């Protein structure tokens, strides 16, 4: 368990990281794809913010009005208002405050409606794009990434977009506008106070950004990586629950999750601790700012250069600014957290699929089903030595070919390369003379039906699983495919028949039943090339017989490649290719290969006792 934790910690450290700026650019680029909602949001925020900026001015003037005796001709230092118009001006200021309040309410309503549509559209499109991207990552990528962790990255990332949208557009933008606006107004009315405020705000913003990016962000990033790990452990244990139960390992898995959760909690607490320190510093700084600015206002009043209305303006303005600054500090921290939560999602978008369609890739047109490998060299990314070195092979149309040999000899690799789950390092693979690297992956794989050793079924109905390759197939066609695959008998016995849900990965069905559903799916796809990858390796005798009958029907008039360890299933095929360390060392039918006294195939057959009772001949 300790070794697993150390290995995971090392992986966390090695994970690719994206910068704060890259993440922000990722979100902004998606905002501009919806200009109508973006403009509505910003316009609403702008009007509401303008109303906030004007409110202290109007309030200060109102205080000046009511503090001036109506019988005098005195005037404000910062505004000339005669005694004959003071009452009218005061009433006008009251009306102005009402209008500004309404503008603020309507502006914010417009911005809330705009950002609701904007955020949902961005989140939906990012979800669609992330799912499409993950779907197109290579088999090697999926083999090295937990499904639970991948799901967590995407879901956490899209909800972080929602938080980031709200924080930037509804909170930080108006806060910045208020700070800039009030500073400019104060610069006009009293330059010294305006300069002091500008310096104080600039220092606050600089320190807040530094704290968010350099002090809090690194710990938040680590916390999120452990959050993804926790999702991966949960998903892995739930998916493999049958294995856990079979070994009575519930307590062990619980202990493993507890270890991961404990580390996650420690990393998260440290991140929150730093966030609290940052917030406390910002709150203390804003208090200092308020004291300095109000002290300056009192100083100017004492010198006789500011009146009651001017002091009231500064007081109102500073309470407004302090609230915004306090919120700005919190929002900068919120932006930092949201960006950290999005980083792993952005990494998915910055990761290029290992196998990509070439520009202007054509559609594969299969008329015969001939498969050729020309001088193919291939090495798995995770391995040090190549599997194939200049491998050549020609499989004629309609030929049934078996691939046999020891594990790791290169049998399954050939089928993966044919499906273009990996790209060859050198050479070409041709289908009816067309280089599969120059055609679309979708068109290639639609022409190849795969029946794997462990068929994966969706938690959907049997009918939907059978029709997965032909989703528009009629019920009659689905039932005919099931009949051809020897699946109709067990389906008809089920209470809901073809509408039966099969459970996650098809756990409600036996291995033989899942295999026959996979064969039915291949029948309905009607692809000219069929691959059987150890299709009967883990079946009982009765299920194997039913599956072999279905396989024999499916092989008719198709090019067939069978990967097999159980050699009894391939002796009637047209060709048997014996692989050894990525090379084809024997090629022929069963009788030809058995005639070789020192042949590898003959030795494999003897080891499996396939000629028991009649001797090896």
Image: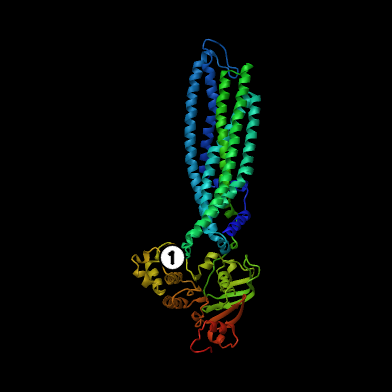
Q: Residue furthest top?
A: 71
Quadrant position of the N terminus in the picture: bottom right
Taking the image as drawn, is residue 260 in sight?
yes
In which image quadrant can residue 480 be found?
A: bottom left
Q: Position of residue 106 (x, y in %)?
A: 47, 34
Picture coordinates of residue 401, whole percent (x, y): 53, 78
**Residue in front for this viewpoint, 88 or 424:** 424
Q: Nearer the viewer, residue 97 or 204?
A: 204
Q: Quadrant of residue 310?
A: top right
The answer to whether one can see residue 29 in this image is no
Q: Which residue is mark 1?
A: 506
Judged from the image, the secondary structure of the residue bearing numbered disc 1 is helix
Q: Residue at the location (49% across, 59% down)? A: 251
The residue sitting at 60% across, 47% down in the picture is: 219
Image position of 21 with respect to 141: above or below: above
Instruction: Tell how many labels.
Output: 1
Indicate whether 215 appears above or below 510.
above
Between 586 and 182, the one lying in front of the other is 586
The residue at the point 57 percent across, 67 percent down is: 420
Residue 261, how many percent across, how many down?
Answer: 53, 52
Which scheme is used to colour this image of the protein? rainbow
The quarter of the displayed image where residue 460 is located: bottom left
Q: Looking at the picture, how far across and down is residue 5, in whole percent?
A: 58, 57
Q: Is residue 224 left or right of residue 508?
A: right
Disc 1 packing (10 Å; few <14; some 14–19; many ≥20): many
């Amino acid at each position: 368990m300790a070794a697993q934790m150390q290995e995971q910690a090392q992986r966390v450290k090695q994970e690719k990281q994206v910068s704060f700026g890259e993440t922000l650019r990722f979100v902004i680029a998606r905002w501009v794809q919806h200009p109508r909602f973006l403009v509505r949001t910003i316009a609403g925020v702008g009007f509401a913010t303008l109303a906030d900026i004007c409110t202290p001015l109007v309030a200060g003037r109102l205080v000046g009005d009511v503090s001036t005796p109506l019988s005098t001709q005195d005037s404000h230092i910062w505004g000339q208002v005669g005694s004959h118009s003071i009452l009218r001006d005061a009433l006008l200021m009251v009306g102005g405050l009402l209008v500004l309040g309404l503008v603020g309410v309507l502006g914010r309503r417009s911005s809330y409606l705009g950002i609701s549509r904007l955020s949902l559209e961005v989140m939906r499109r990012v979800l669609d794009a992330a799912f499409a991207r993950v779907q197109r990552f290579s088999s090697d990528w999926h083999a090295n990434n937990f499904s639970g962790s991948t799901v967590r990255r995407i879901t956490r990332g899209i909800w972080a977009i929602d938080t980031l949208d709200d924080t930037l557009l509804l909170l930080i933008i108006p806060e910045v506008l208020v700070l800039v606006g009030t500073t400019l107004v104060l610069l006009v009315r009293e330059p010294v106070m305006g300069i002091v405020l500008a310096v104080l705000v600039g220092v606050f913003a600089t320190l807040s950004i530094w704290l968010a990016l350099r002090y809090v962000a690194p710990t938040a990033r680590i916390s999120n990586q452990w959050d993804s790990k926790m999702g991966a452990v949960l998903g892995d244990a739930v998916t493999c629950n049958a294995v856990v139960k079979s070994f009575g390992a519930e307590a062990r898995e619980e202990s493993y999750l507890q270890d991961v959760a404990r580390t996650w909690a420690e990393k998260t607490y440290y991140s929150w601790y730093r966030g609290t320190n940052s917030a406390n510093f910002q709150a203390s700084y804003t208090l200092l700012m308020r004291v300095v600015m109000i002290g300056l206002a009192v100083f100017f009043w004492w010198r006789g250069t500011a009146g009651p209305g001017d002091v009231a303006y500064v007081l109102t303005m500073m309470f407004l600014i302090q609230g915004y600054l306090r919120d700005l500090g919190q929002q900068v921290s919120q932006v930092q957290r949201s960006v950290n939560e999005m980083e792993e999602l952005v990494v998915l978008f910055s990761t290029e699929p290992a196998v990509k369609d070439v520009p202007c890739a054509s559609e594969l047109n299969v008329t015969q089903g001939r498969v050729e490998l020309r001088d193919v060299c291939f090495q798995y990314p995770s391995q040090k030595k190549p599997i194939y070195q200049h491998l050549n092979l020609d499989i004629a149309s309609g030929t049934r070919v078996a691939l046999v040999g020891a594990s790791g000899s290169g049998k399954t690799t050939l089928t993966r390369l044919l499906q273009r789950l990996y790209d060859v390092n050198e050479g070409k693979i041709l289908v009816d003379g067309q280089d599969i690297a120059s055609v679309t992956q979708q068109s290639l794989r639609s022409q190849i039906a795969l029946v794997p050793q462990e068929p994966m079924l969706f938690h959907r109905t049997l009918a939907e699983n059978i029709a997965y390759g032909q989703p528009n197939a009629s019920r009659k066609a689905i039932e005919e495919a099931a009949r051809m695959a020897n699946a109709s008998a067990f389906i008809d016995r089920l209470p809901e028949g073809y509408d039966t849900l099969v459970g996650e990965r098809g756990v409600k069905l036996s291995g033989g039943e899942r295999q026959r559903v996979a064969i039915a799916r291949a029948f309905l796809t009607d692809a000219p090339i069929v691959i059987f990858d150890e299709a009967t390796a883990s079946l009982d005798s009765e299920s194997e017989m039913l599956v072999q009958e279905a396989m024999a029907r499916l092989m008719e008039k198709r090019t067939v490649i069978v990967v097999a360890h159980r050699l009894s299933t391939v002796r009637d095929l047209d060709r048997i290719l014996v692989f050894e360390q990525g090379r084809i060392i024997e090629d022929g039918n069963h009788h030809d290969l058995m005639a070789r006294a020192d042949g590898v195939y003959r030795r494999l057959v003897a080891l499996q006792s396939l000629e028991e009772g009649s001797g090896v001949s």
